[in-house]
Amino acid sequence: MLQHNTRQEIAAETRRKLLAAAKSLFAKNGYKGTTVRSINRKINMGDGLIYHYFPGGKKEIFTVIVRENIEQSIDKMNSYNEKMEHLPLEEVLKKILILAENGFAENLELLKILIKEGSAIDFSKIQNIQRLLKTIKNRREWLVSFLKRRYEKGEIKKMDFDIAADQLMAISINNLFGDIINLEIAILPNSQKKERIVEHILNTWKKP
């Protein structure tokens, strides 16, 4: 039994290394510019063995990378809302910005791949893509409702809550864009800047 478990652990670790190597190469060279041999070479694995783990070759590896990253992102996003519901508004805004930034950082390689290969990807064939889009939409709707509840509690003034939610999302997207193209144009380069952004948003939301 111990030997059997060891083989399973080795197989799981090899699979993980293959996916990590492929993800890195896809992000750097694009899907077409990455060969199965280059994936093998990156982890010093013999040619052909990759098909033992992924019979569909490079195409299957790419699909698995996207699918597994989507699943991880969905699980994390679904766990956030309830935790933030009763926190002070300032803390909620900080967490939203930090969580978005961390989420982008964790998936930066995947995002680069999707940007490079977006026109060539048939997203309808990738499992969970629609679920991910629905989850993002639901999180935005939660944020709008959350702001309305904080208005009803007297914490903020009445405003266009849809635009306010979009404002927070736009800040995160701007930061992501700067990371992807490797330019220091991100709105959130450090914790001090986050503090200033949260302070500015709260000042604009406060009742006159």
Image (cartoon, rainbow, N blue to C red):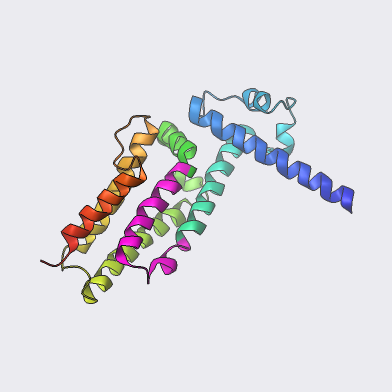
Q: Main secondary structure of the magenta part?
A: helix
Residue 176 in view (yes/no)? yes
Q: Is 158 situated left or right of 46 in this image? A: left
Residue at position x 62%, y 23% from top?
Answer: 38
Residue 30 in view (yes/no)? no
* Magenta highlight range: 78-105
Q: Quadrant of residue 91?
A: bottom left
Q: Is 180 situated left or right of 203 in this image? A: right
Residue at position x 32%, y 63% from top?
Answer: 143
The quarter of the image holding the C terminus is bottom left
Q: Is 149 situated left or right of 73 in this image? A: left
Find residue 48 and report its horizontal and vertical position in percent. Answer: 74, 28
User: How many discs mark residues in the rendered view?
Assistant: 0
Q: Is residue 55 above or below residue 161?
A: above
Q: Is 195 situated left or right of 205 in this image? A: right
- Residue 89 lies within the magenta run: yes
Name the residue at the bottom extreme.
153
Residue at position x 33%, y 29% from top?
Answer: 183
Residue at position x 83%, y 46% from top?
Answer: 6
Q: Is residue 190 above or below residue 203?
A: above
The quarter of the image holding the N terminus is bottom right
Name the residue at the left extreme.
208
Please name whichever residue, 191 or 167, is drawn nearer the observer in this view of the structure: 191
Find residue 76 and report its horizontal and vertical position in percent. Answer: 49, 57
Find residue 122 and report its horizontal and vertical position in percent. Answer: 46, 41
Find residue 11 and report its horizontal and vertical position in percent. Answer: 76, 42
